[in-house]
Structure formats: C-alpha cells, structure tokens
Amino acid sequence: MKLSISTYLNKTTSAAPLAVFRVFFGIMMGLSIVRFWYNDWIDLLYIQPKFHFTYFGFEFIKPLGVYTYVLFAICGIAAIFVALGFKYRIAIITFFLSFTYIELMDKTTYLNHYYFITLLSFIMIFIPANAHFSVDNIFRRKTYQNIPKWTIDSIKLLLGIVYFYAGLAKLNSDWLFKAMPLKIWLPSKYDLPFIGENLMQQNWFHFAMSWSGMLYDLCIPFLLLYKKTRWFAFGLVVIFHVFTRVLFPIGMFPFIMIVSTLIFFEANFHLKIITFFKRILSFLSLQSKPENLRKIEAVSQFHIKKKAIVIPLFAAFFAIQMLFPFRYLLYPNELFWTEEGYRLSWRVMLMEKMGIATFKIVDSETGSFFYVDNKDFLTPFQEKQMSFQPDFILEYAHYLGDHFTSQGHKNVQVFVESYVALNGRLSQPYIDKTVDLYAEKESFKPKHWILPFNDDIKGL
Amino acid sequence: MIKKIFIAILAVSFIVACSSSSSSGDDSPVATDDFDRGALLTNLADNIIIPAFQDLSAKLVTLTADKDAFVADANQTNLDNLRASWLEAYKVWQHVEMFNIGKAEELTYSFQMNIYPVSTTDVEANISAGNADLTHVNNNDAVGFPAVDYMLYGVADSDAEILTKYEDDKYKAYLSDLVNQMESLTETVLTDWTSSYRATFVSSTSNTVTSSLNKFVNDYVNYYESGLRSRKIGIPAGIFSGGNLFPDKVEGYYSQEFSMVLALEALKAVQDTFNGTGYNNSTSDNSLKSYLDYLNVDEDGDDLAFLINSQLDLSRSKIKVLDDSFSDQIETDNTKMTLAYDDLQRAVVLFKVDMMGALQIGLDAGYIDNDGD
C-alpha cells in the first residue's frame, strides 16, 4: 500500500495538459473580470450598497470604496500573467488572494462557481503550471517536458468532486420525484425559440431533465477518466453546459467548465493545442526571435520543491473537500429550509426559494414600534437574497439594531415577520417573530429561531 | 474489474433513466404551452384597461362641465353637482392607478393625479401666484384629485364660506386649471392606448425585464403593496411611524366621508384585474388567476389563486367594518385599521412571494448571474 502510494507520487506525465489548462484558466478569468467591469457590476454590487453581508469570521473583509476597482484590476492583470505563465507563482498567489478577497466582500453574490475558482487557484499555487509553454520558460531558459502526475490529477479530482457532489445533492425527493425546481423554471422559458412553447412546458421533459442532470453530474467524472468514453463525455459536457447557458443566467461558468474538462485529455491532444497556439503567436510575429528560443533548454523532469509539505497539504485539502459538504448532517432541520451547511457544498440549481422579510424595531420599555423599509438600506438584489437566508436575516437585524441605536432610539429590539416559499410550496412563516434577533448571536450552532419546515424532503 | 463495475453502473443508470422518463410520462397528461399570454394581455387591454380609461375620461368630461358651470355661477347647487362628479371620477380613478405603464409611466401620470396628502401651502401659493406649472414635479402634491378635494371641501369651514372663497377669481382659475389638466392628461393616456400602445402592449409577452407582461405584473404588485396597502391604510394608521397616527394622510381627507368607498373601489379593481373580470361586464377571461391555475405549481397543496381571492375577500370584510372616514376611524379606534392592514399584508406575501415565484417574474436588480442557490 505504502509502496503503491509512493510509486504513484513518483509517476510523471506530460506537462502539456497543465500548461494548456493554465492558459485557458487565465484567459477565462481575465474575461470574467472584464465582463464584470464592463457590466458595471463593481459599482452595483460593491460601491453602491450601504451595507454588505459578510461571511462569519471574515467580517473585516469589506469593499474598498473606489479602490475596489484597483482590486479588480489587480485580479484581472494577475489572471493575464497566469495565462502567459509570466512570474507565474507570484501571479497565481496574487490572483488567489485578490479573487478570494472579492468573493468575501459580500456574500450576497455567493456562487458555487466562484468558490470553485478560489479552490482551483489555491491548488494552482502549488503545482508547476508554468513548467511548459510559458513566458517563465523563456526567462529561465528552461522548459520541462514532464511533471509529477499527481499535480494534474489534483485538478481532475477537484473537478470530479464538483460534479459528483453536485450529483449527490440532486438525490433528493424534490429534484427526482417532483422535478423541482425545474418544473417552475423551465416553463418560464416560454419565449425560447423552437422549444419554448412545447418542450419546456412538458411534464415529462422536466423529469427527464432532472434525472439526466443528476446522472450527468454523477457519471461525468468517470466518463471523462475512462479513455474510451472520453470524447463522448466531452460531447456531453459541451451539450449540457451550452444548454444550461441558454436556459439560465449563469454567466461564464459553463465556458469555464467546458475548457477545464479538457485537462482529462491526453498529452498529444494538448501538444496539438500548443502547436496551434504557437502558430498563432508566430503569425502575430510575437515569437520572432527564434535564436532566443533555441537557447531554451528542454529538461525532462520537473521536480516539486518542498514535496514533504505540499503532499500532506493536498491530502488534507482533499479530505476536507470531501467531508465539508456533509457538515449539514450535524444540523437537525431540513437543509433546504434552514440553509445551515448549504453553501460551499456544490449545491447548484436545487432550490426555487423566495421570501419576504418585514423588520419591526421595538422599544422594549414602551412597546412602541415601527417597520423598516428594506429599500432604505439594501439593494433589490441584497433584499432578495436576505429574505430567505437566516444568516443574512440575522446580520441585517443587527445592522438595523445598531443603526437605530446610534440614531438615538432606546432599548432597541429587532423582530422580523417573514415568509418563505420553497420549490413550489406555498409560503410559510419562516422566522419566529417573537424572537428579538438583536439579542441573538451568529454562530455555527443550529438557529433555534427558524420555524419548522412542515414538510419532508427525503434524500441526501 | 473496475471497468466491469463501471459498465455495470452505467447500464443500471441508463435503465433507471429510461424507466423513469417513461413512467413519469405515463402519469401526466401531455401538456403543451396552452396558456396564451397574448390573450391575457389582450383581455387586460380590451376589457379592463381601455374601458376603465374610457370611463374615467367620460367622468372627467362631466366633471369639467360641472366645473365650468360652477365657475360661471358659484352656488350651492353647482357645488353639490361638482362634488358628486368629482367623487364619481375619483372612484373610476381607482381602476386605472395600477396601470403605470406606457404613456402613464412616461408622464408620471399617477403622480399628477393622486398624490396625497395634498400640500395646502403649495395649493394656496399656486392660487395667489396664478398660472402655476401644474406638471412640475414640485406640484405633484398640489394637483389631481386630492387638490380638488381640498378645493371643494377644505378651503373653508362651511359650504357658505367655501362659496365665498370662490368670489375670488384666482380660486376659480386654479380649480379650473386643475380639472382641465386632469382631463387632458387622461385624454393623452387614453388616446395613446387606443391609437398605438395597445398593439405594443399585447404583443410584448416575453419573459424579460422590459416586456409588458413583466412590467404589468411588477406594477400591479407594487400598486397593491404601496398604493393600496400602505398609502390608503398603513401610513395613516401609523404602521410605519412607530404608532404615530396620521389621520390627515388618508385619501379624501377634506371630504371626510369617502376614504372607505375609495379603498373598497381600489380593492375591487385589484381583484377584478387579478381575475380578468371585465370593467364593463362581469365575464372573466385570461388573467393572472388563470395563469396561476395553468401553472398549478403546488399540485398537492391549495390553489394559490383561490387563496389570493380568499385573502382579498377577507381584507374587504375588514375594510367594510371601518368608518366611512378613515380619519375618524383612526381617531376613535385605530385597532380596526391595523387589523385591516394585517390582512392586506398577508396578500402581499401571496402576491410577492408565491405568485411572483410561480410566474418566475423577477425583479430588475441589474445583476443577473446566479447558479440557482
């Protein structure tokens, strides 16, 4: 056993797939930042709001006012450097830090795929993605043909976890036996050409999509690993992600996944891509100094430094990744209802959840009260996200409590009357309206003030 | 070995996949998209919106005629006639305020017709200055039905004294300008509907932020929440002001006796629109109700459209027990106002959470990326 692990760790493979992956990753991230900027979302999401929802334990991470643009610029430039493989290690560390900082600024914008990018860029800090086909090669006058196999496999493993756990999360009665939430979402796409007014409205189609989505997520990592099914699997990847892109506003994510899965292909395929890149570069006459290139020494093996630290780190990282999504089991109530342990677990597209939350500020001495207009404090997007997530409701209640106390109100208590509808069920009262949320503290403990769900969703 | 297990898993998955789709195909009727959103909009335009605007326009023509008579001869009979036609028009107004779309939106029509409480200071200033720009945003609280309410009931304490006020031509001129402006604005909006906007409106059925279907639903829910629930009941009853009561912020404050009539009329308009009931007849056609019935999202639970209607009925019964004058009600027993508010609020939840969720009509937050969690 021990021997086989160390044999595995000593295995090497072509450096080309990782180099191609690095290029695509950098380009995609650069485009994502440009798109975000171009759509003016930096202003909308990070500058305009008066108040930001923070992650528990990361309350100190806040937008930087106009300097938030600088942060995005740094992140975008770092992404380009990653694509070029120029000062790679510094670039990827910068990217990881700036991107993660951006994500931690406001959890209103939390998306699983942003979390995926954070994890991926963390892994990439420790692996030699610049060993081949990089600007660093030119400066070091060294290019490496082979790298340890486990470095590429770690990316495959992370991708595999994302898909497989997304599939596991779909093993629940709402998804499989009620076709929820697709049954709500698909018919609303009635204005799609050709399929909007027929296929999208069919009950069987909602079920077919639910089941095939589940099977796709569970099987695709294995189909990609297995050589004979790889091209078929890649075809499925393209179809699946393009289809979801057409149906849902999921931004860059489908394209990122499509190019990421290329890493499952063999070295020859990636060498062809690199040759293609080189042809474009020489066509643009960027590679006009062949005498320079000739001086680059081709080294067969790349050796990871500090392997004794990196390997245990990766082992721990992946162990956490595999266990973390199951933390919801430590909470007593329905996961979809309370969302305790919901995020950071590859639960995508599982819920149609809407809510309304009306906050009441009470003077505990006199009993006098008034209601808050959420629009005075939150953007429409923040209000929407707040209305059905207990940790948002609590944080906002504290913000309101602090705000009105600082305005001179005395003995402030904050109550909320809220209703939430989940996956087509009628709205139900959500938070106990008799609990003063201003006196409740955020923690990882179960939140006793969330009212019971009154229904049962079976499954994982 | 691994290969074999893998193939076995794959085979089982495909069998599961095939059997699942065929079984679900069996127990459900084949549904194509037989809900016609164009028909919903057409019914709205042809049987609700345009007839209501036509009636409002007719009532405002009468109002203008009665105003002309009053301006020519400011006596008690003419004042009574004028007040009566003002009330008739105000009731019809309750049926159009929610349609803040097209020309009405462009002109901020409802701001020029029904902002209350009226600013008597602004009104008096306009009267003494003469020739005020009634369309100016600063005059929104000095024009429209609430301003006429003040002009006909509030400029003095008794009818005799009011009539005395109108010996001053400046009062006559302002009253005249107000009514003329209301009539001409309404005419502009109605003409736009009947000439070109109707076609635009009924054809824009897509599910986008700017489509008329989505805008109508957003306006409708917004009107119910803010125009009806908050402004007519919640704000005067002190719901948003820590129990500080505002009996002077009711609709029709100066005439004193019509706030309930107007609120009931508005509630009827909201419910008729929901059910697609025609303005001039009681036949119902494609509507939000039939759309919700078609979508029938919660198959096991109660019917959402039924719940909405029940809740609106319940709200009506709570409004009917109030005093004709909400001001008096607030001053004598505000609890009944807050009870009415609570039931109106419960319908806000049904509209904003359940109905908007079922229709998948989102708010325009500018930011669209999500992965559905």
Image: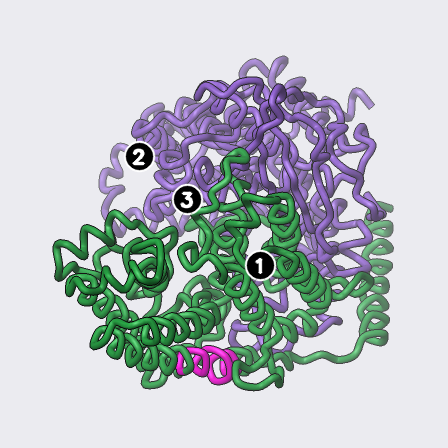
Chain colours: A purple, B green
Numbered disc 1: secondary structure = helix
Q: Label 2 amino acid? A: Leu
- Highlighted magenta segment, given as a residue range: B42-54
Q: Is residue B246 left or right of residue A136?
A: right
Tell us which disc is closer to us: 1 or 2.
1
C-alpha distance separating marks 3 and 1: 18 Å
- The residue identified by callout 3 is A32
- The residue identified by callout 2 is A293
Q: Label 3 amino acid? A: Ser
- The residue identified by callout 1 is A244
Which residue corresponds to the image point at 76% horizontal and 39% vertical from the top-left? A335
Count of marks overlaid on the render: 3
Q: Position of residue A10 (x, y in %)?
A: 66, 25
Which residue corresponds to the image point at 28% horizontal and 48% vertical from the top-left? A282
Quadrant hosting residue A187: bottom right
Numbered disc 2: secondary structure = helix
Sequence order check, earlier mark of 1 and 2: 1
Which residue corresponds to the image point at 33% horizontal and 28% vertical from the top-left? A65
Sequence order check, earlier mark of 2 and 3: 3
* Badge 1: residue crowd in 10 Å (few <14, some 14–19, many ≥20): some
Q: Label 1 amino acid? A: Thr
Between A398 and A142, the one lying in front of the other is A398
Labels 1 and 2 positioned on one and the same chain: yes
* Badge 2: residue crowd in 10 Å (few <14, some 14–19, many ≥20): some
